[in-house]
């Protein structure tokens, strides 16, 4: 797989992965630096934001790169390096306190893990049990995310309710 930039030069998928991981490392250095109070956040509302003013931007970037890291571990490339990178990425994601990023991370990883299991099961009954188990697990995860920052979720629900009433 190759990608073309504006000038028409070929950029390999490996180069793209390297750039993404380099950006991830920079984000993590900033996140850990802000956590250890080595430098201040750009936001007056959030103490840890990564390179941007809003922690959601850094969290979404981390959620974008983690599936590439998991794929490298799955393909047995530099397992100890990528396992360490995965661990520090998950901790950084936790420090950013962003529910949306966790959701964005769980869905592709969920598919990455479940799809091979689904293909291994020959029985339609076992496939249905797997789908049901996964659906229940996903709903429990959504419930956890709701209660994790319930005030924020309730505020957004109120905004949606008021918006719908204004439209109707």
Image: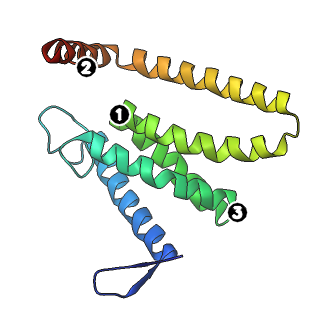
Q: How is the image coloured?
A: rainbow
Q: CA distance from mark 1 to mark 3?
A: 30 Å
Mark 3 or 2: in front is 2
The residue wearing badge 2 is: 156
Q: Provide residue 26's location: percent of width, then percent of height.
A: 34, 59
Q: How many marks on residues?
A: 3
Q: Residue at x 61, y 61 (%)?
A: 72
Label 3 to label 2: alpha-carbon separation? 42 Å
The residue furthest front is 168
| Spot occupied by residue 17 in the image (x, y as percentages of width and height) | 47, 68
- Residue at horizontal 15 percent and vertical 31 percent from the top: 45
Question: How far across and how far down the image is residue 84, in percent?
Answer: 56, 53
Which residue is located at x 40 percent, y 69 percent? 19
Query: N-terminal of the two: label 2 or label 1?
Result: 1
* Circle 2 residues within 10 Å: few <14, some 14–19, many ≥20: few
Residue at label 3? 76
The residue tagged with tag 2: helix, strand or loop? helix
Above or below, 109 against 149 in this view is: below
* Quadrant in which residue 118 is drawn: top right
């Amino acid at each position: 797989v190759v990608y073309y930039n504006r000038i028409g030069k070929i950029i390999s998928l490996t180069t793209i992965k390297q750039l993404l991981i380099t950006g991830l490392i920079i984000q993590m250095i900033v996140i850990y630096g802000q956590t250890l109070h080595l430098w201040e956040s750009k936001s007056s509302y959030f103490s840890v934001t990564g390179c941007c003013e809003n922690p959601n931007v850094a969290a979404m970037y981390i959620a974008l790169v983690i599936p590439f890291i998991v794929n490298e571990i799955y393909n047995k490339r530099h397992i100890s390096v990528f396992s360490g990178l995965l661990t520090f990425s998950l901790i950084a994601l936790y420090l950013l306190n962003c529910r949306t990023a966790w959701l964005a991370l769980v869905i592709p990883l969920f598919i990455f893990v479940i799809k091979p299991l689904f293909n291994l099961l020959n029985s339609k009954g076992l496939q249905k049990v797997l789908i049901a188990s996964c659906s229940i697990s996903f709903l429990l995860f959504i419930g956890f995310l709701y209660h994790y920052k319930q005030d924020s979720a309730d505020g957004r629900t109120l905004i949606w309710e008021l918006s719908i009433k204004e439209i109707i």
